[in-house]
Amino acid sequence: EEAAKRYGGEDFAMSFNKVEPAGYLTGPLFFISLAIGFRHSHLDSGAYSLDQRIFSSGEELPSPREAVQKIIEEEAWRQVLTSLVLCLFARGVYDENLTSEALGSLGYSYSSADLRKLGREIYFEKQRLKWEEGFRASNLRIPKRITDTPTPLGKISKEYFEEALKEFDNIVKKA
C-alpha cells in the first residue's frame, strides 16, 4: 500500500490495511475476510474455502450480511483450533465433536457448543481491541482491482463489498 502510494499503482495494487493478500482470487468472501480479519491475513480465515464451496455447489452468492456471518463463524472456530496449536491444514479433520472428544481424553470437559462459544468470545475480544484502537472496516480503501478482476464467482461489486464492511462494523460495535 505504501509503495503504491509512493510510486503509483493504487488502482491495481491490492492490500488490506497495509497487508498484501495471498494470491487466491476465489471470490468475495475471501476478500472480505482479508479486510475484516484480525491481522488482515489469509491465516486468519479459510474464507477462500467458503467461496470454493459456494462455487462447487452452485449455490447463490450469500447476501453481504450472510457472507460476514459465515466468515465470523469460520474465524471463530479457527480461534479454537489455533488456541490448541493445531495445524490449520488439518482443520477439516478437527470438527467440533472430535475436538471435544480429544479434549475429553485429556480430562477437559467442553461440549461442541462450549467450544463454539469460546471461539466467538476469543474472536470478538480480538475485534473489540481493534475497535478500541480505532479500526473501522468501512473506512478501508477497497482496492479497485477487486472489482475489476473476475473470480470463479464472478466480478465483485463495490457495493457488495462496502455493505459487507458496514455490516461487520455493526456486528463488532454490538458485540
Image: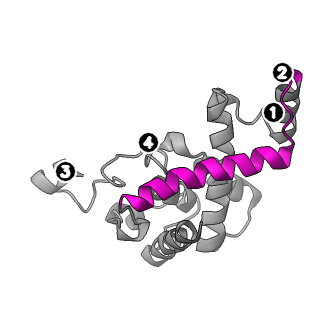
- Whichever of labels 1 and 3 marks the residue nearer the N terminus, that label is 3
- Please tell me whether mark 3 sits on a helix, a strand or a loop: helix
Q: Is the residue marked by circle 2 packed among few (<14), some (14-19), or many (20+) residues within 10 Å?
A: few
- Please tell me whether mark 2 sits on a helix, a strand or a loop: loop
Viewer-nearest of labels 4 and 3? 3
- Whichever of labels 1 and 4 marks the residue nearer the N terminus, that label is 4
Q: Which mark is residue 99?
A: 1
**In percent of the image, x 19 and y 50: which residue is there?**
2
Q: Amino acid at mark 2?
A: Leu
The residue to which callout 4 is attached is 22
Looking at the picture, tell me which residue is in the foreground, 55 or 163.
163
**In percent of the image, x 63 and y 33: which residue is there?**
83
**In percent of the image, x 43 and y 74: which residue is there?**
158
Q: Which mark is residue 2?
A: 3
Q: What's the distance in space between the residues labelled 2 and 3, CA to CA?
A: 48 Å
Q: What's the distance in space between the residues labelled 1 and 4, CA to CA?
A: 28 Å
Viewer-nearest of labels 1 and 3? 1
- Whichever of labels 2 and 3 marks the residue nearer the N terminus, that label is 3
Looking at the rendering, which quadrant does residue 54 occupy? Answer: bottom right
Q: Is the residue marked by circle 1 packed among few (<14), some (14-19), or many (20+) residues within 10 Å?
A: some
Looking at the rendering, which quadrant does residue 67 occupy? Answer: bottom right
The residue to which callout 2 is attached is 106
Q: Say whether residue 117 is magenta.
A: yes
Are circles 1 and 4 on residues that touch, CB within 8 Å? no
Residue 3, percent across and down? 17, 48
Viewer-nearest of labels 4 and 2? 2
Residue 33, percent across and down? 52, 55
